[in-house]
Image (spheres, rainbow, N blue to C red):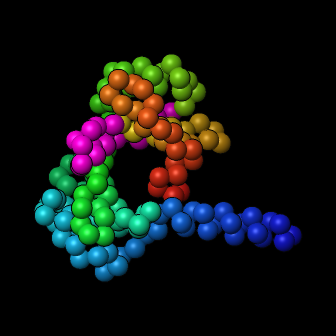
């Protein structure tokens, strides 16, 4: 019984360490100001604290976005949800070849602020397994996040 309790506690703590929902009042003013300056029309903002930074998920017009911002207000990356059909052809081809049996449940375009580099994310599911795979525009896998570790529950 102790083993199960310790395992459950460790699993819960690991999930909590990855991403934690917070209120706007818990976000440093510089991070909030940076978001408002970059995305003045942002609506329905949800904040998470992740790896020492802050992630804001919001709606702007017809787009669903999330941005990662440092406590000092530096914008690190912007992720925009896209349809699977909007992924580059090389990424779609790689998904068909290398991930047969998986269903793409979400797709996104990620732009790194410092470099302007663009990558693409595909959230993949099949019974009993879920993962996020990040690709470059040529379809090469940049990294895989088993269980969708990036967003805690994913």
Q: Is residue 85 above or below residue 106?
A: above
Magenta residues span: 103-119
Q: Is residue 70 above or below residue 147?
A: below
Examine the image and state in which quarter residue 41 appears.
bottom left
Examine the image and state in which quarter residue 4 appears.
bottom right
Nearer to the camera, 91 or 104: 91
- Residue ID at (39%, 39%): 121
Q: Is residue 83 visible?
A: yes
Q: Is residue 56 visible?
A: no
- Residue ID at (42%, 19%): 93
- Residue ID at (16%, 59%): 39
Instruction: Give the residue at the far bottom of this rendering.
Output: 25
Instruction: Give the residue at the far right of this rendering.
Output: 1
- Residue ID at (68%, 66%): 10
The answer to if 118 sits in the magenta stretch is: yes
Nearer to the camera, 75 or 90: 75
Residue 44 pos. (x, y %):
27, 65
Nearer to the camera, 78 or 76: 76
Q: Quadrant of the N terminus?
A: bottom right
Tell me: 107 left or right of 124: left
Residue 29 pos. (x, y %):
23, 77
The answer to if 143 sits in the magenta stretch is: no
Examine the image and state in which quarter residue 22 appears.
bottom left
Q: Is most of the magenta stretch helix, strand or loop?
A: strand
């Amino acid at each position: 019984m102790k083993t199960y309790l310790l395992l459950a506690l460790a699993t819960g703590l690991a999930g909590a360490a990855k991403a934690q929902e917070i209120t706007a009042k818990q976000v440093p003013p510089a991070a909030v100001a940076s978001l408002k300056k970059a995305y003045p029309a942002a609506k329905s903002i949800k904040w998470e604290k992740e790896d020492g930074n802050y992630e804001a998920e919001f709606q702007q017009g017809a787009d669903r976005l999330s941005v990662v911002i440092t406590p000092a207000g530096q914008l690190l990356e912007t992720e925009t949800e896209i349809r699977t059909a909007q992924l580059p052809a090389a990424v779609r081809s790689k998904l068909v070849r290398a991930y047969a049996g998986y269903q793409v449940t979400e797709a996104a375009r990620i732009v790194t602020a410092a470099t302007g580099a663009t990558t693409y994310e595909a959230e993949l599911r099949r019974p009993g397994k879920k993962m996020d795979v990040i690709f470059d525009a040529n379809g090469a896998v940049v990294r895989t996040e088993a269980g969708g570790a990036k967003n805690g529950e994913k």
